[in-house]
Amino acid sequence: MEFANNSKYGLTAAAVFAATVILVWFGWGLTPWWPLMWLAPVPALWFSLRSSWPVAGLVAFASWMAGNLVFFTYFHRLGQSPIAWVANFGSLALLVAAGVLLFRALVLRGAVWSAIVALASLWVSVDWLRYWTTPHGTAADLAYTQLKFLPFLQLASVTGPWGMSFLLLVVPAAAVAAWHMRERAPEQAKRVACAVGGLLLMVLGFGLLRLNLAGQQSTVKVGLAVSDAPENDDVVGGADALRLLQEYAAQAKALAARGAQVVVLPEKIAVVHDVDAAADDAFFQPIADAAGVTIVVGQLHLSPGANGTLRYNRAQVYSPHTAVASYDKEHMLPPFESNLTVGTQHLTLPRDGATWGVAICKDMDFTSMGRAYGKLDTGLLLVPAWDFNMDRTFHGHMEIMRGVESGFSIVRAAKNGYLTVSDDRGRVLAEARSDAAPFSTLLADVPVGHERTVYQILGDWFAWVAVAALVFVVIRALALLKAR
């Protein structure tokens, strides 16, 4: 408590607050800079060992809450109330504050190893619980801040996002604990630094090795086309829908003429009624037959049902000389899609000894979707999507991790976002903005082939490790407090 009676106490708290806000804002924002997230927990953890627990908890909570104001405008543009932002990010800030205080209590009582995993095990355990109890999947996971750190990203193939988030919080906690002990317990400080530093080097070494190992062998030329033109938004059937579908068909034909073997178009191009389906098919099926190309077309499909109209967020798949196949989205975005009928079946397409799969936008926020397609030996996943412009990086790149986790390449065409092609190592092979032209297009070669991963086989095993670690840490902390 070296600042407890010092005039510098307030200035130190303010500096810790400011540093944390900057690190969280730029390290965990809509376009995160990955190195900063490794540093973001450090100021609050360091300050907690030199402050009273109420002040330490308050500074940790307030700084993470303020840092996450970067998402406030995003929530507002999505039509969410300020209360929704407070509920989401207030709970996360409370989680960080609780983890910081648990770290503080354990370090000050000599339980250093328990302290090092305290914040990480708490975060991952609660994050995993949120995954299963909210409709947003892994959307708030810290692991997504590391998508550009490719050697570290390979850890997802073993642990999923949970191991990445865990290590992302363990490393700064270990650094702070080792620094704190450098004079009073130098040998233990060295052991902590060597153990955690060695673990990090092992993880990065594995990542570098995996990046350089030969993976998928064959390639497919893919085409993507998206229009963000205002007149092409919210097209509701009839002549206007037919006009837009015909324009997209022309883009698909042009991409096929340039060699595309598969063309992916965005989510919900137009509202299509059952009575319009034949005209829809007449635009795309002849192109698929003539050019030998597979075309994936996103639409909002309306069908009469026993209790009213059924509304599906659907991907229609046109393959050469084959009956039209369809896939209905399985994970809806509330409240915008709360009135849609949830799909229940995955869709795979056998192609030249490989398997292609189809998913839609928010489906890719869920690790279970990636694992399901991995278990089906999928080598290429085709994803129509629709983002919200400002989240084109934050949300649009989440699907990259699904490919690393479960061993396949991904082609994603998003309105108000990016046209993105990525491989099973998380490398972005080609990308273009959807607003780059009236019809933005992209043509690229993508590796195809499925590679089984530990995460695909064992699933959320590491999340259970985090839960077990948390139980141990809490019991240890309670025992130490009781012994006072």
Image (cartoon, rainbow, N blue to C red):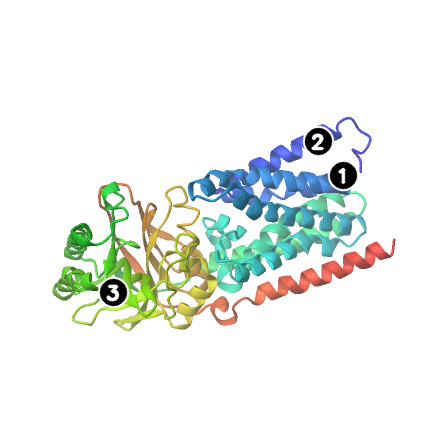
Residue 404 coordinates in the image, percent (x, y) = 44, 60
Whether label 2 touches label 3, CB < 8 Å: no
Question: Dot 1 corresponds to which residue?
Answer: 50
Q: Separation of disc 2 and disc 3 at Cα? A: 60 Å
- Residue 333, by quadrant, is bottom left
Residue 453 shown left or right of residue 420 in the figure? right
Compared to 158, does 429 lie above or below?
A: above
At label 1, the amino acid type is Arg
Marks 2 and 1, the one that precedes in the sequence: 2
* Nearer to us in this view, 329 or 220: 329
Q: Separation of disc 1 and disc 3 at Cα? A: 61 Å
Whether label 2 touches label 1, CB < 8 Å: yes
* Nearer to us in this view, 389 or 378: 389
Residue at left offset 62%, top offset 55%: 198
Q: Separation of disc 2 and disc 1 at Cα? A: 10 Å
Question: Dot 2 corresponds to which residue?
Answer: 12
Residue 278 shown left or right of residue 37 in the figure? left
Marks 2 and 3, the one that precedes in the sequence: 2
Question: Dot 3 corresponds to which residue?
Answer: 317
Local SS, label 1: loop
At label 3, the amino acid type is Val
Local SS, label 3: strand
